[in-house]
Structures are given as structure tokens and as C-alpha cells.
Amino acid sequence: MIPSQRHLFDIPADVTYLNCAYMSPLMKPVVEAGRVGLARKAHPWEITPDKFFSGSEEFRTMAARFLDCTADAVAIVPAASYGIATAARNLPVRKGQSILMLAEQFPSNYYPWERLAEESGASIKTVPWPEDGDWTTGVLESLTDGVAIAALPHVQWTSGGRLDLVRIGKACRRIGAALVLDLTQSLGVLPFSVREVQPDFAVAACYKWLMGPYSTGFLYVAPKWHEGRPLEEGWIQRANAQDFTSLILYTGKYDEGARRFDMGERSNFALLPAAQRGMQQLLDWGVAEISGTIGTLNRKLAQSAAELGFSAPPEELRAPHYLTLRRKAGIPPGLPEALARQKVFVSVRGSSVRVAPHVYNSAEDAERLITCLRDVDKL
């Protein structure tokens, strides 16, 4: 168990923030790293050409540790939607085939596939919401011949349901389907390995569980797709980019590995150091240890909420860091706003109260939420 790390965050004592699945707070050292990075541009004469590459390579190397892959397989992207669009541009799908996704999937992992299906004559195949909370079985039953791409998360964002990606990866390879993952609601808090899952593409935005700033993220690209077509054709993706004097000698060759898929202006001198500092702290704590700590808090929360008539998915089927609470009477309209007036912050997604704590939370935070839920119909 990791003791409460609230001292690293600028969270007032009277605020109970249980909404990391919406957006994480930035740690004080992360804010400072971003401030120092932003201030560098006040003296641009000190930013030598090598700085355009050193910081991004450090970020890439650290991102690879969360994915369990080599740095060469990581591209730097600004958002999950950018990574999903990159995958959609490069994966083949024929007329009559289908693209598999979950019911209520996050829009950024839906719209690019809807566009691809329209353009290719394919169809969208949806895994329905499982009454028993078992998304994995639903996906495996839906992975039939004719599925060209399975576009999935590790954690379904409105239910907290956890998918067994190792089993799903094996099933995809058995039928020849590509596997594309949005790990934004899991990476940094749920252990993951591309060596075990073997996806074709996997993307994560940093502003949630990776404890980083907005507009930062990274994309895993399997080696078989390293010769693919990027969304952008920027100067820094090319093989001669480090020699500024030869940039006008245009080349058709790209930099090594997945770097061709990097976003433009990837060398962000403020955001990348901040994102890297957040990820370093997560590694120092340990992803498995973070998961276990939050899971223990959520387990106790689920037990207390059950006494008030709220139900949660079975613990073995949900992600430990993610708790969604439902009740037969439904969730009153305006509940998040009512709780916010009590300085208790959660989200409502679909018909569930979504509770997403982190290591800055404590048993006292959990009790404050339960106290509010006792009077849920009066809020």
C-alpha cells in the first residue's frame, strides 16, 4: 500500500477529488517542470538544435517502459484521437468485413472507424453491454470470421469493465484481425505489456492516469507497420532532420521505427518535460502498487455504497482503479453539481456514478463521499 501522497498535489484539505478518470491533477513537481520548460523559450538563443531531439527521445524511452516495448516502437502524439486516426489510415479493411468495438465506446475510438467503414464498404460490429459485466466474453464471442479490426480499450469508460487483452489478442491473431487499443483509461495504473497482448497499435493520452498535461500522449506501433503512412509529413520525421543545414535536401526517407508517426512540433519544451516528470513519479511508486492501493480503497467504497443501495460490477470483472455505482432508483439529475457544492468531485457516465480515486486520496475522502450518498435524493 502506498501512503497518501496528497502532499505532492495542490489539493485543498476540504476538497475530495475522486475523478482521475476525468482528468488528473498535476503534481507540484510536474507543474514546476512545465514552468521551467516554458521559460526556456524566453531565451531561444539557448535552445540549440540538439534540444529538438534529446527531450523527445527521453520522453519516448520513458513511455516505452509503460508499454513494455522498445523506444523505436513509440510515436509521440497529442491525443488518443490522433493515434487512432493513424491506425485507421494504415490498417486494411475490405468491403463486407467488419470493425469490432464495444457498446458506449469512447467517441475518439469510434468516429475514425465509422469513417473508415463508410469509405471501405465495411460495417461496424458492436459488442452489446453485458448484463453480467463480462466484456471479455462478449468480445471473444464477437471475434468471428469477417472481423478485420478490433478497436477496443483496456477499461470500458462508462462501466469500468476490464478486458482480458491477452486472451483477446490471441483470438484476434487466430482469425487474422488487427487489434487497436485505447489505453487512456488504464495505462499508468493498470499493468500492461505489448509483448503479452501483441496489439498492432496502442495509444494513451497522458492527462488522466499518466498524471501529465493535456495535449500529450504516445502511440505504440508494431514493427510490421513501421513502413506505414503518417498523418503528417513534418521535417522532424525525416532521416536527415538532425542536420539543420541539410533540411533543404529533401528526402523520402523517414527516421527509424515509429518516429515517422510523430506529431508536428513534437519537441514541445514545456509539455514533454512535465509529462515525463509525471510518468517518472508513477514508475517510482510502481504501477502494480498504485493499482493495488486504489483497488483497496475502491473495494471499501463499494462495500459501503452497497449498504446504501448502490451496486458495482463484480470485482473480478472491473478495473481496480475504477468504480461505477448504480442503483435501482437511478441517479438523480445534477448529482455531480450537487456533490461539487459539497466539494466532492465525481462524474456521472451513463447511468452510473463514476468514482476514480488515486494515491492522493484517503479513507477520509471515501467517507466524505459515502456521507453525501446517504442523502443522495436530498442533494
Image (cartoon, rainbow, N blue to C red):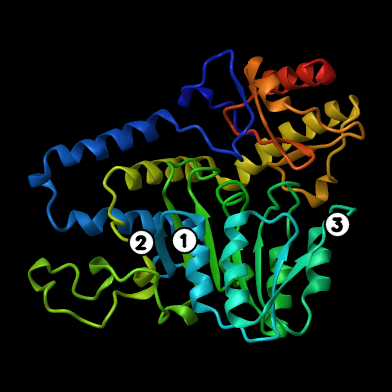
Q: Is residue 351 above or below residue 361?
A: below
Q: Earlier in the sequence, mark 3 or mark 1?
A: 1
The residue shown at (56%, 83%) is 92
Q: Is residue 326 above or below residue 205?
A: above
Q: Is residue 81 visible?
A: yes
Q: Is residue 66 visible?
A: no
The residue shown at (70%, 53%) is 156
Residue 378 placement (x, y as % from top left):
82, 15
Q: Secondary structure at mark 2?
A: loop
Residue 376 placement (x, y as % from top left):
81, 20
Q: Are marks 3 and 1 in contact (CB under 8 Å)?
A: no
- According to the image, label 2 marks what residue? 263
Q: Is residue 114 above or below residue 5?
A: below
- The dot on residue 219 is none
Q: Earlier in the sequence, mark 3 or mark 2?
A: 3
Q: Are marks 3 and 2 in contact (CB under 8 Å)?
A: no
State the CA–CA distance, disc 3 to disc 1: 29 Å
The residue shown at (63%, 86%) is 94
- According to the image, label 3 marks what residue? 130
- According to the image, label 1 marks what residue? 82
Q: Secondary structure at mark 3?
A: loop
Q: Quadrant of the C terminus?
A: top right
The three-letter code of the residue at mark 1 reads Tyr
